[in-house]
Image: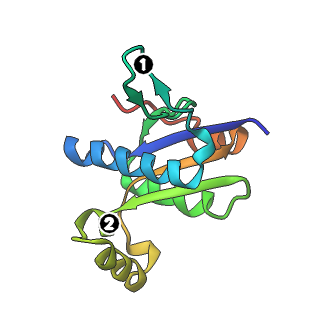
Amino acid sequence: MSTKCVLIIDPELPLGIIANTGAILGAALGKLHPEINGDDIVSQEGILFPGIVNIPIPVLKSNAEKIAGIHSEASNTDNISVIAFTDCAQTAQNYVEYTESIQKVQTQDIQFLGICLYGDKKKVNHFAGDLPLLR
């Protein structure tokens, strides 16, 4: 199986929230799929450069409504990992508050700021193949 990874972020968000969304999704992806990270590297001077992701991750754009639809459909698709960053997470003061917020709300009422799709290339392309790059 050939794999692919994409981030899909709402371009209408403020620039800081877009950057934060990408960072959070990337960190969660690295936790869920540590095999995508390369080995640590030591420079000539002995400075450690911890391993970074060794696959391309294009950052695409779509509106919140379409992101929610992709999340819903992709979450029920085999061979794709779906990671979401939501308004519940962005506004929470800590992880306990985030957990409580997610557990109290219907998924249909969540605003998705961005998602990460990783898995079977054909299936990822099905959901994200027509989306433009976020620039």
- Left or right position of 4 against 106: right
Which residue ends up furthest to the top in the rendered image?
A: 44
Instruction: Specify the quadrant that holds the C terminus.
Output: top left
- Left or right position of 7 against 117: left
- Nearest the viewer among 118 and 67 is 118
The residue lying at 52 percent from left, 54 percent from top is: 31
Residue tagged 2: 89
How far across and how far down the image is residue 16, in percent?
A: 20, 44
Which residue ends up furthest to the right in the rendered image?
A: 1
| Image quarter of residue 62 | top left
Instruction: Specify the quadrant that holds the N terminus.
Output: top right
How far across and how far down the image is residue 20, in percent?
A: 29, 48
The residue lying at 46 percent from left, 60 percent from top is: 68
The kind of residue tagged 2 is Ala
How far across and how far down the image is residue 43, in percent?
A: 42, 18
Binning the other alpha carbons within 10 Å of mark 1 as few (below 14), some (14 to 19) or many (20 upward) gives few
Classify 40 as above or below 82: above
Q: Secondary structure at mark 1?
A: loop
| Image quarter of residue 96 | bottom left
- Nearest the viewer among 45 and 112 is 45
Residue tagged 1: 43
First in sequence: mark 1 or mark 2?
1
Q: Secondary structure at mark 2?
A: helix
